[in-house]
Amino acid sequence: MTASLLEVDDLHVRFSVSGGGLLGSGRRMLHAVNGISFKLAKGECLSIVGESGCGKSTTALAILGLQEPTEGTIRYRGQPLTGTGAPGRMQRAKAVQMVFQDPYASLNPRQTVRASLAAPLRLHGITAASEIADRIEVMLGNVGLTPEQALRYPHEFSGGQRQRIGIARALILEPEIVVLDEPVSALDVSIRAQIINLLLDLQEKLGLAYLMISHDLSVVEHMSDRVLVMFFGQVVEEGGWRDIFEKPAHPYTRRLIAAIPDPYAEQNPLRQQDRLPGVPPLDGRGFASDCSTAPDVFSAPARSELVEIALGHRVRLVPAD
Amino acid sequence: MTVPLLDIRELCLGLAVGRSVVRPLLKDVSFQIMPGEAYGLVGESGSGKSVTSLAVMGLLKKPLAVSGGEILFKGENLLALPKRAMRRLRGNRIAMIFQEPMTALNPLSTIGRQIAEMFVLHQGKNWDEAQELAVEALMSVRVPNPDRRARNYPHQMSGGLRQRVMIAMALACNPDLLIADEPTTALDVTVQAEVLRLIKELCAERGTAVLFISHDLGVIASICQRVGVMYAGCLVEENETRALFTDPRHEYTRGLLGALPRFGSRSQHGRQRLVDIDSIIADRSKLVETRFIAPRCAEEGSRS
């Protein structure tokens, strides 16, 4: 059993939103994340998939420390990242970093690439000019840019190059975990392929663990080791990539897979709903929901539990009475 | 031999200063769409697929200008048509749906009224009749509770519903040609699948031809009978959809298909490295000189 790098246990995030009441003055609690638990091992790529509003980004923000969880714990190498005794942002920054969907929006337009990459190093006590220069050069080489390009500003780069800079910025402090939030969905097909290849190369070379947030199941299938399928704040199915894509059990997972626009669907047995392997015996338990309608996000979800149907493959079911 | 509904012949357009084109954006683009046929244009950003559709709609704005070629719609050259005649055609015989319905809908007017406007402007109906037709149009795109929804404003609807409204509006006058420019790019996958199915079914029912523009090869494949691949302002390959995906002839098309993570391929063949188009194509500028346009199939004339 390899020790987990990151352990998320029963994470809840609720937001107080206005609405309801006669004058819209009442406050209601919106349940964005409802009891998510998972472990991330070193060097592993775990993907969270789901549609808008399912809570995948909120989960990522909680791990980055940008969103305080309402309940639950997040541990990094056994140390809690939440509650009292949690480390500050500085220590957290060395453990977890993020690559954003739109690199243009996340890079400072008035700083050269060099300045953007040097700032986190200085903040973390690396002040010798030669060491900074060396580390920047190595990092730029890692992401496929030349040292001369470090003197340019973000607007001078193409979309693909900017995403490379975004990756370099995330990796400059040598974190063990990188959160990838839709890392390629804003990119053209040819650039997307280059960035996916780069991310896989870096993962292997640097032993990175990725937590990827995505709605693009083709990319998820290509990159992931394990997959969590989320629907309205809950995990409805989780498992290794083969479990999820070859033997999907939950109706929602099946529907997501059926919805992938795929030019080769006709030749691909996994794409034909009726030819998907049958759902394994569930011992008389039923699915908590087939997720065809949106649940009430303002009330706690109905009682259900994740049941292991094969080693490491778990599905949300209503418990047998 | 059927006459093509839309026949684009050697269309050239570009950025113009005064009368001279300083930067060409489309070079000799030619393709035809038959009545009732769904034709896809696929390409990356800047390949020229969207300006092609704007040229058909007569919506090019300065400094974009057509510098050569013809756009024949039912045999009539749209480029030579006076503005008034073009306005009568637009929305009526040729309709368009866009990527972001929120920017195409008027936020200050109910969607019922916005659909009704189509019937008033193009079919001379009075507002009362038009309102009823609008509710029917909403029903035809399977919007639940069409009566109530007709009184909604755009912000009260989800992205998928708004796109359905756009489709209802575009198909209101039973156009001959529907131009869809990335209509599902902003939607979630399951909603995207529903909207695509809707466009496909409605257009097949009514015999509406579709010019479908997307960067997503999967989306194109699920809706179009024939596909044209655009690159750097040129149509580099055109073929029947299935043939294009199983037997791509042009170097760029092959690169594009190889760059796509192909769903299910990891299960069958293990993880394959994605093709980096830049590394297999040494000289991109030479690329567009070669083209592959498949001859139209033999039974073309007997297509029902």
Image (cartoon, helix red, strand yellow):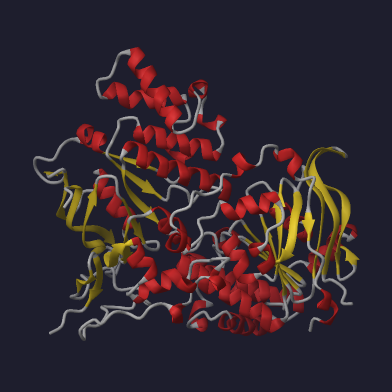
Q: Is residue B106 visible?
A: no
Horizontal and vertical percent position of residue A8: 19, 53
* Viewport quadrant of the C terminus of chain B: bottom right
Horizontal and vertical percent position of residue B75: 90, 69
Vertical order, B173 against B45 (above or below): below
In-front residue for pair B131/B300: B300
Horizontal and vertical percent position of residue B92: 75, 72
Vertical order, B118 against A1 (above or below): below
Left or right relative to A135: residue A286 = left
Q: Residue furthest left?
A: A84
Left or right relative to A24: residue A194 = right
In-front residue for pair B200/B251: B251
Q: Is residue B232 visible?
A: yes
Horizontal and vertical percent position of residue A83: 12, 46
Vertical order, B172 against B10 (above or below): below
Vertical order, B51 against A250 (above or below): above
Q: Residue at x 86, y 71 (%)?
A: B74
| Residue B111 found in image quarter | bottom right
Q: Residue furthest front?
A: B269
In-front residue for pair B94/A8: A8
* Viewport quadrant of the N terminus of chain B: bottom right
Left or right relative to A221: residue A311 = left
- How many circles with numbers are drawn on the protein? 0
Left or right relative to B104: residue B187 = left
Q: Residue at x 75, y 77 (%)?
A: B36
